[in-house]
Image (spheres, helix red, strand yellow):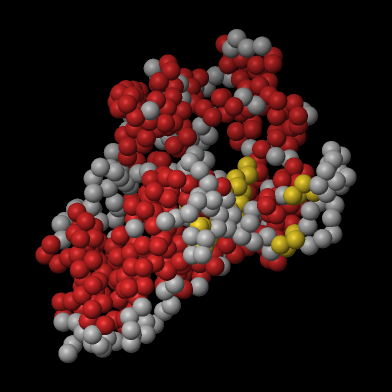
Amino acid sequence: MTFLNRSESQRLRALAALANCNPFVPQRVEFEKAALGKAYTDLGETWHLSLNPDVTNPNLEKIQALLPTFVRLLRDRLAQGEEASKEQLIQYESLVRFHLYHQYDHEFNKLIERSEKEELASRDVPSYQRYAKEAASLLSIPGVKLPVGNEPAHLFAWGFQIRRAFNYIFKYLCGSSKPMAELRASVWESIFTHNPDRYRKFLYQHMGDIPTLIIGESGTGKEIVARAIGFSRYITFNENTQRFSVDYASTFYPVNLSALSPSLIESELFGHVKGSFTGASQNRPGLFETCGPLGTIFLDEIGELDPAIQVKLLRLLQTREFQRIGETQIRHFEGKIIAATHRDLGKEMESGNFRSDFFYRIAGDVIRTPSLQEQLKEEPSDLMRLVRLLAERSVGSEEAAHLAEESIQWIEENLGATYPWAGNVRELEQCVRSILIRGSYDSAQLNKSQTGGLALTGILMKLDLSADELLRQYCTAHYARCKNYQEVARRLQLDRRTVKEKIDEDLLNSINLP
């Protein structure tokens, strides 16, 4: 007897492909169509998912409804001795994993909610016993040797990783424009690669060896992307203790390189021993030592890094070895590095400020974040979605709708649809906050048009600032361009500590560079 008829074979093939595909790519929709046939509901645009959490995908609901029956049907036929090809057995395995994931999706969500409130690794996960029992009944079939080993603990950890990745990509990378859809798809590949089968079989253990470089303008959410990747790393599950090995929410270590001097950066990353420099009163481990194998270190503004430290980081990336400052003992780094920059590293290499060998080591995997202008050009309605999200952050969900409506009205009347948003989402957030407080937003672009061609002296004559206030604004303006205290001090011929003291954070956040 034939294991599957033609219709069942097509459905199995489509569901297996759907189980293994990137959920943020257009092919996902084609697989849904093939799996559902005439039952498929046309939702319009195929390259993004709805960003309204109250709107569910009816096609996914239909697929979730048919999975249990279809999986059991195939399992029973295999148990009865009906022969399936190797390809069909591989597809059946994918189908089972897909089914289990959706069966326990709610449990995985609860684990995410719990981890954001308490330590996940210190708590048992009672739902695993049910998961393991069901996985065994579907995958351990007498007389049937499936092509790939499917240990329940590994599948459970893999399912939890899938849920975290979808949560942090879909929830925090906001926008329904095509550039944002492509960004979400790119981040998913950074976590699972383009070949999820290879990832699940063995590559999940080695993804920490591959650094990721995020490039994009300031204010485009590079740290959000980094967090999504860091929070979505594979975490082992111990079936004996029924606990995860680490708390994923505490394994992300961000470092803003532009805010630290070269000596402080070196100490922060590599650590130091007592007496290795003035002020080193005790031994101190660095982040490379405390990170752990499942941790992620995020090096923001990598383009500002001193060449001498670039050499040390290059050695670390090549050998995974490092030493504390003032020590000869070799230590090993086991975590993952994610770096980000708004600078054009190609130009920085040409000018000699960034080592080419370091660039090729750090750029093993590259993600580009789109500007807000690119997003709105493709999807103008994203402005309202983003303003609503930013309004919720400022005033909460109850008042967000009113603030969002007020902000959009002011933007339309005063800035217009073609406003460039040079500061990207960070500038949009400042705009919403300013409208909340003052009912308006005094953008740098407007200031520029108002001052027009006035000479510097003329501008200064119109200002009512003390010498200290003028110096504060001057230092802040220079720092906004180079993001390096040492460089500002050199340009203005001031002490570095003076520059750092004079930086006005509120003014810095409102500056929009062309």
386 left or right of 230? left
Give the residue displayed 41% in from the left and 41% down from the top: 372
Could you tell me which residue is drawn at 14 percent across and 67 percent down?
37
250 on left or right of 393: right
Q: Is residue 203 left or right of residue 163?
A: right
Closer to the camera in the image, 361 or 172: 172
- Expressed as whole percent of the image width and height from the top left, the position of residue 449 reads 46, 23
Residue 149 in picture, x, y percent from top left: 43, 77
Q: Where 160 sits versus 460, above or below?
A: below
Task: Give the x, y percent position of residue 480.
Answer: 60, 33
Q: Is residue 411 visible?
A: no
> Would residue 393 be found to the left or right of residue 327 on screen?
left
Using the image as rendered, state which of residue 5 and residue 429 is in the foreground.
Answer: 5
**Residue 247 locus on image (x, y percent):** 54, 51
Residue 381 location, quadrant: top left
Residue at horizontal 30 percent and vertical 23 percent from the top:
402
Give 114 or 58, whichever is nearer the viewer: 114
Outermost residue toward the left in this view? 38
User: In the picture, which quadrant includes the N terminus?
Assistant: bottom left
